[in-house]
Amino acid sequence: MLKIGIIGYGYWGPNLVRNFMAQPNGKVTMVADTRSERLDLVTKNYPTIKTTKNAEDLFGSEDVDAVVIATQVFSHYELALKALNSGKHVLIEKPMTSTSAECKSLIKIADEKGLKLMVDHTFLYTGAVQKLKQLIDEGSIGKIKYFDSTRINLGLFQPDINVLWDLAPHDISILNYLVDEIPYSVNATGVSHTYNEIENIAYLTVNYKSGFIAHFNCSWSSPVKIRTMLLGGDKKMMVYNDLEPTEKIKVYDTTYNHSTDEEKRKIMVEYRTGDVYIPMLDSKEALSGMAADFLKTIEQGTTPVSDNKSGLAVIKILEAAQKSIKQNGKEIILE
Amino acid sequence: MLKIGIIGYGYWGPNLVRNFMAQPNGKVTMVADTRSERLDLVTKNYPTIKTTKNAEDLFGSEDVDAVVIATQVFSHYELALKALNSGKHVLIEKPMTSTSAECKSLIKIADEKGLKLMVDHTFLYTGAVQKLKQLIDEGSIGKIKYFDSTRINLGLFQPDINVLWDLAPHDISILNYLVDEIPYSVNATGVSHTYNEIENIAYLTVNYKSGFIAHFNCSWSSPVKIRTMLLGGDKKMMVYNDLEPTEKIKVYDTTYNHSTDEEKRKIMVEYRTGDVYIPMLDSKEALSGMAADFLKTIEQGTTPVSDNKSGLAVIKILEAAQKSIKQNGKEIILE
Amino acid sequence: MLKIGIIGYGYWGPNLVRNFMAQPNGKVTMVADTRSERLDLVTKNYPTIKTTKNAEDLFGSEDVDAVVIATQVFSHYELALKALNSGKHVLIEKPMTSTSAECKSLIKIADEKGLKLMVDHTFLYTGAVQKLKQLIDEGSIGKIKYFDSTRINLGLFQPDINVLWDLAPHDISILNYLVDEIPYSVNATGVSHTYNEIENIAYLTVNYKSGFIAHFNCSWSSPVKIRTMLLGGDKKMMVYNDLEPTEKIKVYDTTYNHSTDEEKRKIMVEYRTGDVYIPMLDSKEALSGMAADFLKTIEQGTTPVSDNKSGLAVIKILEAAQKSIKQNGKEIILE
Amino acid sequence: MLKIGIIGYGYWGPNLVRNFMAQPNGKVTMVADTRSERLDLVTKNYPTIKTTKNAEDLFGSEDVDAVVIATQVFSHYELALKALNSGKHVLIEKPMTSTSAECKSLIKIADEKGLKLMVDHTFLYTGAVQKLKQLIDEGSIGKIKYFDSTRINLGLFQPDINVLWDLAPHDISILNYLVDEIPYSVNATGVSHTYNEIENIAYLTVNYKSGFIAHFNCSWSSPVKIRTMLLGGDKKMMVYNDLEPTEKIKVYDTTYNHSTDEEKRKIMVEYRTGDVYIPMLDSKEALSGMAADFLKTIEQGTTPVSDNKSGLAVIKILEAAQKSIKQNGKEIILE
């Protein structure tokens, strides 16, 4: 039975506690938060969990085998570093850290100490993303040509990270999970409607050597909520609408072929359209799968779906995107 | 009764003929197209209209007061130039020409000769865009903060122009019609899935000095058709979904205010959400309004809604977008 | 080349003329309407078609092989009778006549005279209904258990027929086309919001001996337009939404099995849900297929999809429904 | 602090416990259920609540001021009777009892003993229904002409009550809440696809002397979930779609007027259509409002929104509907 300590009991914390408590091989033993009213909530609902205002108490406790960090992004690195140095396995909420250097440093330390370090990209554990992955892996979509994501709504303006750091990790982690090719460069533009220069609307293009392209539209300022992803393959195309209650994924038997008509010196494109297929999805709660994966990687040494390489890959793109925005959309080559 | 000659009887030509024929003060007298089967169609449906394979016949005819150019984009300039030089008023389908230099040249000649030169941005004449304009002009939306347009579907790959030149003129002309501020620069990225380097997917950001931002997502390769525009003001926000049969425009009583909390050194953003209002729209055919506007500008010397300055403004943005794409998304300052 | 005369050039007439004109083996030679402004429209668009205010002119003309009756329902019988007695084949718009006795009388006369008598249930020729029929016939839906149709909108109040006679023929003809079982009885309720006792809202249940049930919700007084049909089989279920531009039919791999748990003396029902499939549909204009079928039945003696038995079957149900409404919903056994 | 005992901890029970626990002036002290695994769930989540397999324990306990009955319908009467006879206030889940005689008997006893007897029609406490009520009461809808409800999905077949008893209480209680007129009669039809003669699909019409009509379409056998209600007034019309996440109610500025054209002896109907308005709704949990109303009626003697007269009115209609179904749709006059 692995003993879990959780730092941060804000919006996501209660979901983490509930899901780790429900695992057969894990339980939450401690929760840290600086706000006493949040700790009171823990005590009310889970009288067996110890609470503390000081995260350090978790690092020194024998009642904690692994630490989950669900605080504001700027504090991720320092907390994870201390946890690893105290010999605890670590799970960090997305985005993993504020810089890729911090990510790499944490990965190095975890490896040296033989500890597990994982990031929570919850969406990878949804029935929808698992189905997208399966359809791509079994070859029915063909070679992916583009990925186009829109994630906009009336969102809480974050004080320390911009809208890309807040929303795009979901979509970038899905992109990286589904597409093997290494991204080459990014361009990003955005605008801040407040005076802190933190963008509340931003657009990101990720470029690839093969001609594959990925685009992300993120906004905290849309009156309507949209959570839509298009993936075009050379055999079929898919639309993933996360707001649909049951029909989240539609697979279109649609594609186009092009040939060059030498004489006319132009491209002839032929479309093929056909049936649409809406696969049934596993409706298990994604966060429960994530929690189970974290416990499994600790107990069995397996590589989790949402591993730290995935966390680093997201940060690299976000870091480059930020540079591009600040340089007026200039292409930033990824290392 | 103004006599109209139309060059090009492809996809849009029949709509032009039908709408000009229905005007009380105009009629179509000649149609030119290089394809005899297209001309046969004209004759079958409109026995009174003369047809010719040679556009030059229109320029020399006394039966033609004004010429409508509905051919492929690369031919717009030359045909318009000849028409103007023959003393004919000219209406050009969007996009006006292939370069802004051509636009300017045509405008100069028309002005010198006292002839009318107009471009057909049909969408400006829709009940929906007229309502957006009215709501903005009467002040109920407040200062516009962003414009975000998605126009994607399984579209015909054009052999001479990319997807931005094909689709974005609709949205850029609407943007320019609704927002007075002069655009400052553009960034664009895109990809071509054929071998002719003509982009079938492209993303365009138009930047403004005030912090207003406009973004366009255009694709010929989406399995689903989306025609959605979001406009956020500091009083209200609007969504224009052109695929809705009757409820195209929704006005959200939604906005946010921000203040700076000095002590916490962070931005406090407060949302306000409220009722939604779906205004009834004028359902008159937009192309009929455009045709009437062209005849009116000739007869009465009025400035049409979709004037040649509007045509030039669109071309400037498209031209800069093309440069940006070819320079990997680099910001291109508009003149 | 069959020569067609059309009586009635109102809402549907122009569609009939256009589609019969487009047939390779037919053409419209005469149109009758009592309103001269409607006849002017014919002449303007089709200078070769003769027009008359007197339907009798068609019956006596050698230029007419077959007559299409597109007038108000109360006049169908008399006009069809005269046409048949003049030796013309006859196509009648739905609903066929005002009473089943009139239907039977016309069928008898047509048979005696060796003339073709057909009714225009256009929906049977749509790609959607053809696909429903195919899916049922090939057995993939299983035994149909229920049929539930909603056809409501802000409709024109008809002066001579109620909303069931106006709207339900579409759905009843589809029901009869898809389901072989003979209906046993009907119940109907409705209300008239005008003073003429012509119902503008009505509900119809058609009962069958096997336990299959069909229900129709028809209204001229709904602020929203709904055109939805559900068909539940014991293998799969289908939803037909005629307002969807491309995804009109969805096939759900959903069903339930029931068993009796003797001990608990209750029914155990198990659901099975699965993928959804949206078949691609033939997008050919339905009315063109109907026109071709009428010409074919005349030329080749084939039985049309929308034959006069189908017309009579619809009238029997409408007639019984009207009786039921006037007797406060009492079950009316069909003959 | 009122002490609540709850009988039945099935699907709805946990929601009742959670909402009564959250009231400032009430708490749940006991829960009874015959299944020990359900009681274990209570203990796990609420260690302070006593559990018992015997409902009688609640009636005799001083720790219980009021009893909530959330069991199968057939047991409602007996349990409520015992509770009242033990001097407890009673809240019963919808539908109140199996017969109107039982309802009346309980109401009489409660009145005699000065105890509160209420029924839980949760929907009356939703922001949506409260808004419908407000719009009607303030006169902006005008006189209501029709009410049309569809509540269908793949539902659990109930062993003791048919689909009308299961689903229609929601809609009938809303109808009665919104419309003052006393219903005159009902017609109902339905079908059972199992062998227990319990209908899984049923249609109900409620008739009124004034010409107002209400119709209910209920099904446990639809592959799609629909929760839609139309209300047509002579000033405006409303659509209530409970599945919309935020835009549940649309108010259409749509209506029709009719006049009689004496000469033509026909009804002239003129439509007026206009803007649509989507009011913002209170998003408070409905069940919390219901729980508060029950506590308030006990403490302050106020009449609750969902009072026992409302419970009885629903049962009268359901009882008549059942009679009508068993008599093949015959009109049943309500007492």
Image: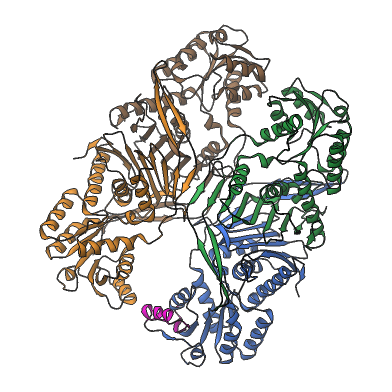
Chain colours: A blue, B green, C brown, D orange
Q: Position of residue A319 (x, y in %)?
A: 69, 74
Q: Is residue D212 left or right of residue B266?
A: left
Residue C145 visible, this orientation: no
Farthest left residue? Answer: D112
Number of numbered discs overlaid on the protein picture: 0
Give the extent of the magenta segment. A22-48
- Residue drawn at the location 61% of the way across and 25% of the way down: C292
Q: Position of residue A199 (x, y in %)?
A: 64, 67
Q: Is residue B335 above or below residue A333?
A: above
Q: Position of residue B73 (x, y in %)?
A: 81, 43
* A185 vs D191, nearest the viewer: A185
Residue B262 visible, this orientation: yes
Q: Is residue C116 left or right of residue A106?
A: left
* C107 vs D262, nearest the viewer: D262
Q: Position of residue D159 (x, y in %)?
A: 29, 54
> In the figure, residue B333 lies in which quadrant?
bottom right
> In the figure, residue B22 lies in which quadrant?
top right
Q: Indicate the quadrant containing the C terminus of chain B: top left, top right, bottom left or bottom right.
A: bottom right
> In the figure, residue A140 lies in which quadrant?
bottom right
Q: Indicate the quadrant containing the N terminus of chain B: top left, top right, bottom left or bottom right.
A: top right
Residue A39 in the magenta stretch? The answer is yes
Q: Is residue B101 above or below residue B287?
A: below
Q: Is residue C147 above or below residue C324?
A: below
Residue C143 in the magenta stretch? The answer is no
Q: Is residue C294 left or right of residue C24?
A: left
